[in-house]
Image (cartoon, rainbow, N blue to C red):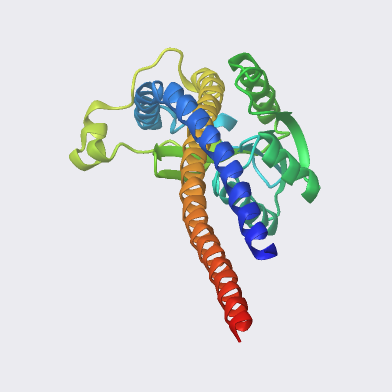
């Protein structure tokens, strides 16, 4: 009897859990569709920024500005960390935090010290537990985290980089590829890592056309572009963080619902067997009692 009650209780608990996972799946699906509408523009923007970096490479090659050449020596480096505020989204947060731990170990072994700007409560709590130097924190809340807030933090980081207080600026977070793939990416933002244009390099086009003509030029161009590049890169990772979180949670909740379906089926079969065994035992007792009265 107690076994039947236990199985019934487990089935009820799983059914209650399914109500939560289905609701979270539906909410994640709605939010993901909302942010997916911006994905084509985000991809176009990222591609355009890459093309600009490659085009500016020759123009900034001889510039001595810290945005291009960096600061000499070793010192404090800044890492901008993007995680989610909540869990129940698979390895979305844990994979980023593992990458951060690995990166920290690597940079410290090279003689650098790190400070952090944390976007997302999960990353912030991890930083607190590890005793990291936290420069700024903002929750990944769509209602409170706005472009102006990102711009303000970006400008503060950039101004400190220009003075040499920060030697390098890095960013790490999830980058949305598709509904089944969200990659953890680590990127150096400052100093700029200008990429050569592979097509132009292969055809000799860069040498024939010379450096890109820009206005302003030289150090002024480097300083103004560096500020814009840092702010816009943070905005891109901010958008990717939301996309990756909702997509990962959508998949995780769907898997949880399917797994609970399997467990409910398993426990239901066990419950039916237990009930049948109980009925069979009661019939045997009735028959045995009747036969005993005959004797």
Tell me which residue sits at (62%, 77%) in the image: 289
Tell me which residue sits at (61%, 75%) in the image: 285
Residue 83: percent from left, percent from top: 61, 38
Which of the 4 image quarters holds residue 6? bottom right
Q: How many marks?
A: 0
* Side (left or right) of 41 relative to 273: left
Residue 33: percent from left, percent from top: 42, 25
Q: Quadrant of the C terminus?
A: bottom right
**Residue 88 in view in this figure:** no
Q: In this view, does 228 lie above or below 269?
A: above
Q: Which of 230 and 234 is in front in this view?
A: 234
Q: In this view, does 290 lie above or below 186?
A: below
Q: In the orientation shown, which residue stands out farthest toward the front?
A: 294
* Side (left or right) of 84 relative to 2: left
**Residue 163 in view in this figure:** yes
Residue 45: percent from left, percent from top: 39, 23
Q: In this view, does 124 lie above or below 60?
A: below
Q: In this view, does 107 lie above or below 196?
A: below
Q: Nearer the viewer, residue 143 or 115?
A: 143
Q: Quadrant of the N terminus?
A: bottom right
Q: Nearer the viewer, residue 145 or 275?
A: 275
Q: In the orientation shown, which residue stands out farthest toward the left?
A: 203
Residue 176: percent from left, percent from top: 44, 37
Tell me which residue sits at (49%, 61%) in the image: 266
């Amino acid at each position: 009897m107690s076994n039947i009650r236990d199985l019934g209780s487990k089935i009820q608990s799983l059914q209650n859990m399914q109500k939560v996972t289905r609701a979270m799946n539906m909410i994640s699906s709605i939010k993901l569709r909302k942010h997916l509408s911006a994905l084509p523009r985000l991809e176009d923007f990222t591609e355009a920024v890459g093309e600009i970096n490659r085009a500016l490479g020759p123009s900034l090659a001889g510039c001595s500005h810290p945005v291009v050449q960096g600061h000499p020596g070793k010192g404090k480096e800044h890492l901008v960390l993007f995680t989610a505020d909540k869990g129940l989204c698979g390895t979305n947060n844990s994979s980023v935090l593992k990458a951060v731990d690995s990166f920290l170990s690597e940079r410290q072994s090279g003689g650098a010290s790190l400070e952090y700007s944390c976007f997302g409560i999960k990353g912030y709590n991890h930083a607190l537990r590890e005793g990291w130097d936290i420069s700024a924190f903002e929750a990944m809340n769509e209602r409170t985290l706005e472009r102006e807030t990102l711009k303000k933090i970006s400008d503060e980081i950039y101004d400190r980089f220009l003075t040499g207080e920060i030697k390098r600026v890095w960013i790490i977070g999830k980058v949305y590829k598709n509904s089944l793939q969200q990659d953890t990416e680590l990127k150096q933002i400052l100093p700029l890592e200008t990429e050569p244009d592979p097509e132009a390099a292969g055809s000799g086009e860069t040498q024939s056309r010379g450096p890109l003509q820009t206005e302003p030029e030289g150090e002024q161009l480097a300083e103004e572009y560096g500020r814009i590049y840092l702010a816009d890169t943070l905005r891109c990772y901010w958008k990717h963080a939301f996309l990756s979180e909702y997509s990962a949670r959508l998949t995780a909740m769907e898997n949880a619902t399917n797994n609970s379906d399997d467990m409910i089926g398993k426990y239901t079969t066990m419950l039916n067997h237990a009930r049948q065994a109980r009925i069979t035992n009661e019939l045997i007792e009735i028959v045995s009692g009747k036969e005993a009265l005959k004797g």
